């Protein structure tokens, strides 16, 4: 009987153990499945895509809120690994549509359906367009000014991928030169032509490269006369604005690559000061006397250049419609 009792106890123990193992197995399977899903989500957070844009909402929660109490737009949401930012310009955004530029330098933004633009700028300033992308096109986020934010937005729903990568070194497919001096660091010159604007027979274009500023802060024309009357355009036909206003005074330039010619002058005159710089050189624009303008260009050649800028904040200027 003791043996039989022990047998029954052992049998009962075996049954309980079997049930326990089964339950534990089910729990482990469920836990593994749960962790598997979590791991998949974590992997998706590393590289987004292909993904669809979201209709993000900007709600005014501070100041200055220049777009009213609320606005909305289609935007890409950055992965949690880059710690996206949801506050800008007095608004709190429903989704993480902004990334600190330092966290996403070298990332490739690719649009797979629809269209979208890549924007960048300081948290409380207007943002510049770095690239406008159609389906099948991509752009690699370049080095930008300290504190800049990057977003990808479109006028309608679009699909995209966000792929981490090393800081771009130039020349790779999908990489565009960063040419906006208000956000790019370094900033690249834009290939340009000076077109004749006078009434006489066209004497032909001048060719070179310039740092192009926002239209509200600089002039497109040189305001000169005769055959030297010129307006500046990109080689693709868009008007450029390389002639800086008086705010150029104090602008600090350091050459990263290529050769640079700095012009300091009084607009419209046929005399100016030239300073030739090479890679590694630094220079501070110092307008004197009646000088009220400056330009950063190639030294009479077609070779591109890159520079870094500091203490160089464009300001609104008054100009005629021709400028």
Image: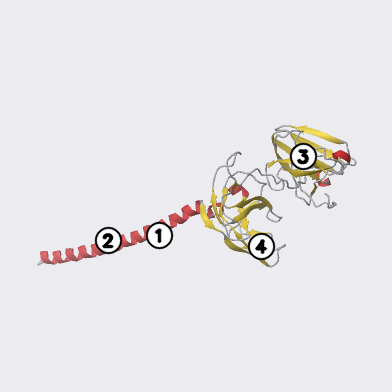
At 62% across and 58% down in the image, what residue appears? 154
Label 4, label 1: how many angstroms apart (C-alpha)?
Answer: 36 Å
Label 4, label 3: how many angstroms apart (C-alpha)?
Answer: 36 Å
What is the secondary structure assignment of the residue under circle 2? helix
Q: Which mark is residue 91?
A: 4
Residue 305's x, y, as percent?
70, 37
Single out the residue that lies furthest toward the right. 290
Q: Are marks 1 and 3 in contact (CB under 8 Å)?
A: no
Mark 1 or 3: in front is 3
The answer to which image quadrant residue 287 occupies is top right
The residue tagged 3 is 296
Q: Earlier in the sequence, mark 2 or mark 3?
A: 2
Left or right: where 141 falls relative to 269: left
**Callout 2 crowding tier (Cα within 10 Å): few <14, some 14–19, many ≥20:** few
Q: Earlier in the sequence, mark 2 or mark 4?
A: 2
At 14% across and 64% down in the image, what residue appears? 7
The residue tagged 2 is 21
What is the secondary structure assignment of the residue under circle 1? helix
């Amino acid at each position: 009987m003791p043996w039989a009792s022990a047998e029954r106890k052992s049998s009962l123990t075996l049954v309980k153990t079997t049930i326990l193992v089964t339950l534990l197995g089910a729990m482990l399977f469920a836990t593994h499945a749960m962790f598997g899903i979590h791991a998949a989500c974590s992997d998706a957070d590393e590289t987004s895509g292909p993904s669809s844009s979201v209709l993000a909402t900007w709600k005014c929660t501070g100041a200055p809120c220049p777009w009213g109490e609320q606005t909305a737009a289609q935007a890409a949401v950055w992965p949690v690994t880059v710690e996206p930012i949801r506050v800008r310009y007095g608004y709190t955004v429903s989704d993480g549509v902004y990334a600190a530029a330092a966290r996403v330098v070298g990332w490739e933004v690719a649009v797979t359906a629809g269209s979208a633009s890549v924007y960048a700028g300081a948290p409380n300033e207007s943002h510049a367009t770095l690239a406008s992308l159609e389906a099948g096109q991509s752009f690699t986020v370049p080095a930008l000014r300290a504190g800049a934010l990057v977003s990808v937005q479109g006028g309608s729903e679009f699909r995209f991928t966000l792929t981490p990568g090393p800081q771009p070194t130039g020349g790779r497919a999908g990489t565009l030169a960063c040419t906006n001096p208000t956000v790019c660091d370094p900033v690249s010159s834009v290939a340009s032509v000076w077109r004749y604007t006078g009434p006489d027979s066209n004497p032909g274009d001048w060719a070179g490269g310039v740092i192009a500023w926002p239209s509200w802060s600089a002039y497109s024309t040189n305001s000169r006369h005769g055959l030297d009357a010129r307006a500046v355009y990109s080689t693709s036909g868009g008007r450029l604005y390389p002639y800086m206003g008086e705010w150029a005074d104090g602008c600090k330039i350091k050459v990263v690559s290529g050769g640079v010619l700095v012009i300091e002058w009084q607009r419209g005159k046929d005399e100016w000061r030239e300073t030739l710089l090479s890679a590694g050189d630094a220079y501070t624009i110092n307008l004197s006397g009646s000088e009220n303008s400056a330009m950063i260009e190639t030294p009479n050649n077609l070779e591109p250049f890159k520079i870094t800028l500091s203490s160089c904040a464009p300001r609104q200027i008054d100009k005629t419609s021709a400028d």
